[in-house]
């Protein structure tokens, strides 16, 4: 029965998820250009090559590294269906990844397993619906609600995302102090090098993406080497 379930997951569900994941994400890419096309062709505001180049460099220097690091870093938790759903609905790091990790832990399934893939699919779908409802409520009455909160509490909300990521980091590296130490060391070393101007030769207004690149891929290399040593 176990082999039959595995076969159904890999031979039927994954191809189905890939097919619809590609279609829906390509559709999202296309419709994201609709506001640009409206501004250019209907209102007649067409930027020049220089303006487009400045915008491209500014965007890539800030988020370009995420195009490569996020799918690789989040794949062990989200899997194929989760990656497609997270990149389509958004809020990957601050919602989909924590939800997927906690859901798999609560269900008692292994990260990256077939069972985990099913749990991730359900949890990401539910979180997307809940997020849409919450955002709708926040857009309608969020400003009024925040205005009623004390100033200290409003300021404290800025620490919610770092706290969430810290909790997720602690859970994912539980029982792996060397892995945790490696990631923290690489991030700290990258930040110090950034402050000392080691990356100033890189064009763009921001080089913080280099720190992310160093921490993410450096940790992946360390994990791979450690895994190989355990197998030997």
Image: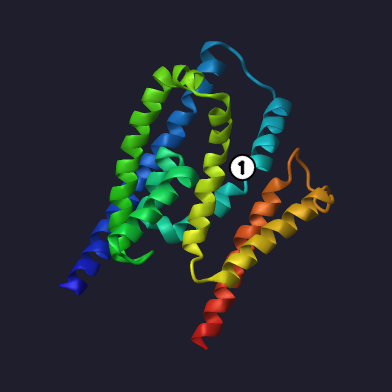
Camera-nearest residue between 9 and 77: 77
Which residue is farthest left?
1
Q: Mark 1 points at which residue?
A: 63
Q: Taking 143 as reference, is 209 above or below it?
A: below
| Residue 143 drawn at (x, y percent) | 48, 19
Which residue is farthest bottom?
232
The picture quadrant where one finds residue 88 is top left
Q: Taking 195 as reference, is 135 above or below it?
A: above
| Residue 144 drawn at (x, y percent) | 46, 16
51 sits left or right of 177 in the view: right
Q: What element carries label 1?
A: helix
| Residue 151 drawn at (x, y percent) | 57, 25
Give the number of marks: 1
Residue at the location (49% across, 66% down)? 174
75 sits left or right of 206 in the view: left
Q: Taking 157 as reference, is 95 above or below it?
A: below
Residue at the location (62% across, 18% down)? 46
């Amino acid at each position: 029965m176990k082999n039959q379930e595995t076969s159904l997951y890999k031979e039927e569900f994954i191809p189905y998820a890939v097919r619809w994941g590609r279609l829906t994400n390509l559709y999202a890419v296309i419709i994201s250009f609709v506001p640009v096309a409206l501004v250019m062709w209907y209102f007649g505001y067409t930027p020049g090559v220089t303006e487009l180049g400045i915008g491209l460099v500014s965007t890539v220097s800030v988020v370009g590294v995420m195009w490569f690091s996020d799918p690789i870093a989040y794949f062990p938790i989200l899997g194929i269906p989760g990656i497609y759903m997270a990149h389509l609905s958004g809020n990957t790091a601050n919602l989909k990844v924590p939800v997927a990790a906690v859901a798999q832990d609560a269900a008692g399934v292994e990260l990256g397993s077939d069972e985990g893939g099913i749990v991730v699919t359900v949890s990401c779908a539910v979180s997307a619906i809940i997020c849409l409802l919450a955002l709708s409520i926040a857009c309608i009455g969020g400003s009024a609600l925040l205005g009623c909160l004390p100033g200290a509490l409003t300021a404290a909300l800025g620490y919610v995302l770092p706290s969430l990521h810290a909790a997720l980091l602690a859970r994912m590296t539980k029982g792996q102090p060397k892995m945790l130490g490696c990631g923290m060391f690489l991030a700290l070393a990258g930040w110090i090098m950034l402050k000392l101007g080691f990356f100033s030769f890189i064009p763009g207004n921001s080089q913080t993406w280099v720190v992310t690149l160093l921490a993410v891929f450096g940790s992946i290399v360390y994990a791979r080497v450690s895994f190989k040593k355990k197998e030997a």
